[in-house]
Image (cartoon, rainbow, N blue to C red):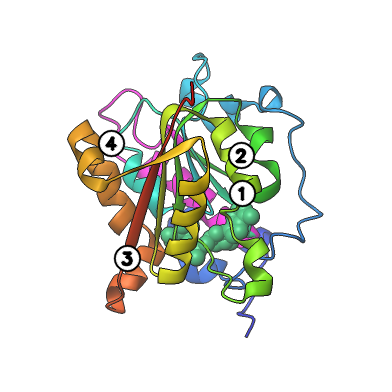
């Protein structure tokens, strides 16, 4: 059943914003986003609007959270990697508005005892990542790509809407630099097997286990992948299982 809607214009100020003010349908249809406008290429994105504290730096986003939902991963990682720009992509209008307001509020309220002050390195765009990822990210610009608890699209005829597919993997390989990591996690075993099978079959990715990632110093990222997102927390509350699968972008030479 569709949940109560509220327009972005009627959304409350960031100070009193809570998720309930931004509710909308639980699932987005990635094939009906005709009203969205996109930059023609990454060079056309003015990143200083997203990251004003980095306006004088040539930095571009290095971490991308695809289908970021309410932004839990971005908010958890932002203070851990203060010099790394991170971008969430979310197709649902109210949800992306919520994340935008959440970041704006955190930028104002967090203690400013660091330079740059916290959360300056994190932002969000409302976008259909299945269609327009390369409009935002240049070739080999990303070091991490996150797919956390993606919509499962259970029925076979809906599998084409899944965010991991052979065609899309070519795009993910294009935007990731060699050595970059794709992090996936889900509580749906069938989807886990699907993502693992497609990523394993793709020649530009190789599986990398959790232990190896931790040995490389990526433990805080793995921990955030497991626990920081709203969907991950829901799975925990319901006593569900979580399946992690990570892959490294390789150079086939
Ligand atoms: C089940 S939620 C998980 C959200 C978040 N990653 C988490 O773990 O809490 C999946 C999210 O992906 C978003 N989404 C689905 N298809 C998308 C697409 N093509 N582009 C961007 N976001 C998408 C949905 O709107 C939804 O917020």
Between marks 1 and 4 in the image, the one whose residue lies nearer the viewer:
1
Task: Tell me the magenta residue range.
Answer: 93-122
- Nearer to me, 69 or 140: 140
Q: Nearer the viewer, residue 93 or 86?
A: 86
Could you tell me how far apart the alpha carbons at marks 1 and 4 are, in whole angstroms?
32 Å
Q: Earlier along the polypeptide chain: callout 3 or callout 2?
A: 2
Dividing the picture into quadrants, the one containing residue 32 is bottom right
The residues tagged by marks 1 and 3 sit, at their Cα atoms, a distance apart of 23 Å
Q: Tell me which image quadrant ligand 1 sits in.
A: bottom right
Q: How far is the residue under mark 4 from the one under mark 2? A: 29 Å
Residue to which mark 2 is pinned? 170
Q: Are marks 1 and 4 in contact (CB under 8 Å)?
A: no
- Horizontal placement of 52 versus 9: left or right? left
Q: Earlier in the sequence, mark 1 or mark 3?
A: 1
Q: Residue at the location (58% across, 44% down)?
A: 169
**Mark identifier at residue 242:** 3
Q: Give the residue drawn at x 36%, y 72%.
A: 234
How far apart marks 1 and 2 lie (CA) works out to 7 Å
On residue 80, the disc is 4
| Labelled pair 1, 2 in contact (Cβ < 8 Å) | yes
């Amino acid at each position: 059943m569709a949940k109560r809607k509220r327009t972005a214009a009627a959304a409350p100020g960031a100070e009193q914003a809570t998720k309930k003010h931004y509710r909308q349908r639980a699932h987005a249809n990635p094939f009906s986003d005709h009203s969205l406008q996109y930059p023609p290429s990454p060079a056309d994105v003015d990143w200083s609007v997203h990251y004003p504290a980095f306006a004088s730096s040539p930095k571009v986003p290095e971490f991308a959270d695809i289908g970021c939902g309410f932004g839990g991963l971005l908010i958890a990682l932002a203070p851990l990697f203060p010099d790394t720009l991170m971008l969430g992509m979310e197709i649902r209008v109210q949800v992306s508005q919520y994340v935008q307001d959440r970041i704006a509020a955190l930028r104002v309220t967090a203690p400013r005892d660091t330079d740059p002050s916290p959360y300056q390195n994190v932002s969000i765009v409302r976008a259909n990542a299945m269609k327009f990822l390369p409009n935002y990210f240049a070739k080999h610009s990303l070091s991490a790509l996150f797919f956390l608890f993606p919509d499962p699209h259970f029925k076979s005829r809906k599998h084409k809407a899944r965010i991991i597919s052979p065609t899309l993997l070519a795009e993910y390989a294009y935007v990731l630099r060699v050595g970059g990591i794709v992090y996936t996690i889900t509580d749906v075993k069938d989807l886990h097997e699907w993502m693992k099978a497609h990523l394993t079959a793709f020649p530009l990715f190789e599986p990398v286990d959790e232990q190896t990632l931790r040995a490389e110093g990526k433990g805080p990222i793995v921990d955030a992948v497991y626990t920081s997102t709203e969907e991950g927390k829901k799975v925990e509350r319901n006593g569900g299982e979580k399946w992690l699968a990570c892959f490294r972008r390789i150079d086939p030479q």
